[in-house]
Image (cartoon, rainbow, N blue to C red):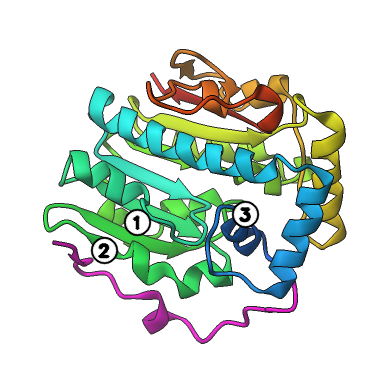
């Protein structure tokens, strides 16, 4: 039975009320709507519909990316014995979340969630639960400032960084422009983690449908949501210096699919994925 996280204060106890800006589309709420969630507003739905008009396969690609997250967490927990996860760019909680997947296999697993979006903060209570044996926490921080996350006392209470950690960066780096050096940011996180740690990462790409996916990028940027599309070589660069697990960098639905997975066309996917280990 789940219980509130020990020694961790809830977000509402630490922060003033936040302005959700319901009249402005928000990337987390647009994503929530496209995968069938209910935590969204009219501005988000308008942005989502415009993006789907540009590329009708967008909801398929997003749901398939969510499936990859679940498979990667399950695989790392079952096959590699990972018991600590750092999930950055958490988004609006949608079950099953990382801790639910990991703790179903290993009840003592520990998960630190990180995001800096007001809408996520308001729903973080759903992430602040754990099995009695495990721990979870939520840290309100910016991915672009790795040291503020790594040094946060809440994270340090939950994760032991002298032991391996799986860093999960699902559907986040496309919101970080090249001018902010996303590859350098990822390296700073990985440098702080022990040997034997893992990097699970997805990258938004237009390789499968440059015109349609390019239209999604224009729609997001026109609505004030910076989004950068990258190719396979740029995706592989995120893993430089680490050993990729088979099958390497591939479209998300090709990364160790479940035996009973429904077939998905490559042209309906706009996300590369990879999982690598730090030696």
Residue 129 badge:
2
| Frontmost residue, 212 versus 97 | 212
Q: Which of the marked residues, 2 or 3, is nearer the chain's N terminus?
A: 3
Give the side of residue 140 with respect to residue 183, left or right.
left
> Residue at image x 12%, y 58%?
132
Task: Report the magenta stretch's main SS.
Answer: loop
Secondary structure found at label 3: helix
Distance from disc 2 to disc 1, alpha carbons, whole Å, reads 15 Å
Instruction: In the rendered structure, find residue 155 and report the number of the disc placed on it.
Output: 1
How many C-alpha atoms fall within 10 Å of the one at disc 3: few (<14), some, or many (≥20)?
many
The answer to whether residue 63 shows anywhere in this view is: yes
Determine whether, in the image, residue 262 is placed left or right of residue 235.
left
Q: Few, some or many C-alpha atoms within 10 Å of disc 1 (few <14, some 14-19, many ≥20)?
A: many
Closest to the camera, between mark 2 and mark 1, is: 2
Q: Is 148 left or right of 231, judged from the image as shown?
A: left
Residue 126, given in percent of the width and then of the height, sits at 35, 66
> Is 240 drawn above or below residue 44 in the view shown?
above
Per the rendered image, the range of residues in magenta is 1-24
Decide whether residue 6 is among the magenta residues.
yes
Mark closer to the observer (2, 3): 3
Residue 135 image point, x, y percent: 22, 56
Q: Secondary structure at mark 2?
A: strand
- From the image, tell me which residue sits under label 3: 34
**Element under label 1?**
helix
| Alpha carbon distance from label 1 to label 3 | 30 Å
Instruction: State which quarter of the image contains the C terminus.
Output: top left
- Please tell me whether residue 226 is drawn above or below residue 85 in the rendered image: below
Camera-near label (1 vs 3) is 3
């Amino acid at each position: 039975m789940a219980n509130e996280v020990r020694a961790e204060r809830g977000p509402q106890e630490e922060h003033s009320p936040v302005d959700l800006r319901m009249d402005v589309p928000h990337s987390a709420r647009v994503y929530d709507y496209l995968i069938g969630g209910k935590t969204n507003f009219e501005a988000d739905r308008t942005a989502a519909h415009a993006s789907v008009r540009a590329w009708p396969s967008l909801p398929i690609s997003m749901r398939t990316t969510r499936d990859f997250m679940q498979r990667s967490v399950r695989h790392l927990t079952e096959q590699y014995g990972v018991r600590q996860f750092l999930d950055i760019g958490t988004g609006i909680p949608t079950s099953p979340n990382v801790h639910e997947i990991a703790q179903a296999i290993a009840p003592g697993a520990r998960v630190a969630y990180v995001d800096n979006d007001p809408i996520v903060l308001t729903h973080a209570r759903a992430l602040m639960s754990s099995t009695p044996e495990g721990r979870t926490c939520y840290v309100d921080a910016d991915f672009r400032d790795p040291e503020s996350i790594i040094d946060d006392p809440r994270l340090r209470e939950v994760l032991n960084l002298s032991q391996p950690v799986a860093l999960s960066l699902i559907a986040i780096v496309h919101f970080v422009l090249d001018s902010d050096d996303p590859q350098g940011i990822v390296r700073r996180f990985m440098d702080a983690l022990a040997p034997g740690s893992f990097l699970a990462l997805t990258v938004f790409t237009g390789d499968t449908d440059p015109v349609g996916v390019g239209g999604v990028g224009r729609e997001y940027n026109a609505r004030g949501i910076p989004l950068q599309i990258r190719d396979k070589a740029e995706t592989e660069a995120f893993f430089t210096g680490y050993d990729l697990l088979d099958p390497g960098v591939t479209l998300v639905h090709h990364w160790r699919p479940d035996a009973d997975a429904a077939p998905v066309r490559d042209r309906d996917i706009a996300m590369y994925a990879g999982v690598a280990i730090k030696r």
